[in-house]
Amino acid sequence: MKFISSNTESQTDETLLMRYRKTGDKALIGVLFNRYVHLVYGLCLKYLKDRSQAEDAVMAVFESLMGKLQNHEVRYFKSWLYMVAKNHCLMELRKAGTSENLNGSVVENEVFLHPIEEAHADIDDDLEAMEKCLEQLRADQQRCVRLFYLQELSYEEVSKQTSFALKKVKSYIQNGKRNLKICIEKQHVDR
């Protein structure tokens, strides 16, 4: 049984997000999530390597959307949802202490969250190395990287908050991410 008009199905993500912000109609979030649920499940399965845990993660991500979408202005729902799901899975793995499931090869942004490709690296050491390296970045790179990855702001939101031009924000994030990877790899070699 459908409670939403088929016209809603053909609307863009941006239009549905705008309508949700205006009306608070949770069914609109359901339509949006439904478009990408297969991607979220695939991502969760890849990280968690267990169907049941992946299904639970998909539900947890969906349940968290209402609150997150009220607190964040999202422009690109698909990308944002991907980051929310990925971060959820990484937190689940961290809670479970199963860092061997993180292999550094799933997504481009994972270099920041788990830059070492050693399957059995201790995640606490990686996080400690990442924090040290973050502190060594130039101030502009550090600020943009923290806002983009840790606070999950979009490029545009980072630009507004820092007053940096959008191209500068993208450059600072890209260069900061590269510098983090180099620094963290160096720290692991020095151990």
Image: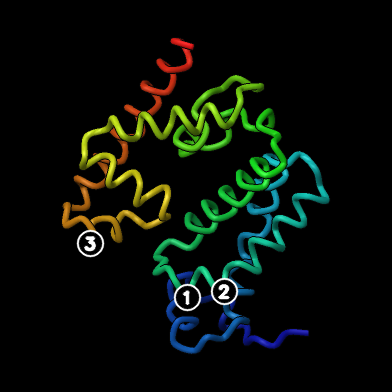
Residue 142, position as x, y percentages in the image: 28, 40
Residue 157, position as x, y percentages in the image: 30, 61
**Residue 16 or residue 153, whichever sits in front:** 153
Amino acid on which disc 2 is placed: Met
**Of helix, strand and loop, which one carries label 3?**
helix
Compared across the picture, whether 102 is left or right of 18 comes to right
Figure colour scheme: rainbow
Which residue is disc 2 drawn over?
66
Amino acid on which disc 1 is placed: Gln
Proximity of marks 1 and 2: CB atoms separated by less than 8 Å: yes
Which residue is disc 3 drawn over?
160
Residue at the spot x=64%, y=52% of the render?
A: 39
Which residue is disc 1 drawn over?
70
Question: Along the polypeptide, which appears first: circle 3 or circle 1?
Answer: 1
Compared across the picture, whether 122 is left or right of 97 comes to left
Residue at the spot x=78%, y=50% of the render?
A: 53
Amino acid on which disc 3 is placed: Lys
How many marks on residues? 3
Residue at the spot x=49%, y=77% of the render?
A: 16
| Above-or-below relation of 58 to 143 | below
Proximity of marks 3 and 1: CB atoms separated by less than 8 Å: no
Distance CA(mark 3)–CA(mark 2): 24 Å
Compared across the picture, whether 41 is left or right of 112 comes to right
Question: Along the polypeptide, which appears first: circle 3 or circle 2?
Answer: 2
